[in-house]
Amino acid sequence: MAGKTVSQRAVSHGLTQPLHRPEATDAHLLLGVMSIVHDEPLATAFNALQKGKVTEAQATGLAHFFEEIGAMVIHNLISRDLLFDAFAFDVYWKSLGTIVKRTRKTSHNPKFGENFELMAEMAAEYRQERPPKLEVSS
């Protein structure tokens, strides 16, 4: 469940729908998301993001894709638990957020990436509330 800060932002944006538990239909949606991000034209950009070597052009495409996923999350069309367990949207925002904010200004589109940004905040809350499944060895 989203923490206080995220909940306040969500309520201020009219995002008050309750969360739902993962269901079989969520698995089909997750597989669809995974097939898109692991196929071209996004696969190369997603791999670059994972390596910390994403270009600005790649970042814009990824941010737009994450924005679309964010719309599904915010409208409660896919389980947040399932999606946040599979993808690190908060980590992706750390890499792409500056570019998204710059694009908002240069494109005069203050809404660009807003679902991605909100979803990243929710994903950070998810990560804080759940310890890693495996302990990292040094």
Image (tube, grey):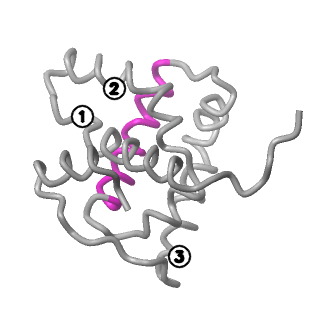
Q: Amino acid at mark 1?
A: Phe
Q: Marks 2/3: CA distance?
A: 29 Å
Q: If the image is split into quadrants, where does the N terminus sit?
A: bottom left
**Segment tinted magenta in the rendering:** 56-73
Q: Residue at label 1?
A: 112
Residue 75 falls within the magenta-colored stretch: no
Label 2 vs 3, first from the N-terminus: 3
Q: Amino acid at mark 3?
A: His
* 15 in relation to 119, above or below: below
Tell me what residue is drawn at x 19 percent, y 45 percent: 9
Q: From the viewer's perspective, is 48 left or right of 4?
A: right
Tell me what residue is drawn at x 10 percent, y 48 percent: 12
Residue 104 in picture, x, y percent from top left: 22, 24
Q: From the viewer's perspective, is 83 left or right of 68?
A: right
Q: Are marks 1 and 2 in contact (CB under 8 Å)?
A: yes
Q: Residues within 10 Å of mark 3 (few under 14, many from 20)?
A: few
Tell me what residue is drawn at x 37 percent, y 76 percent: 20
Judged from the image, the secondary structure of the residue bearing numbered disc 1 is loop
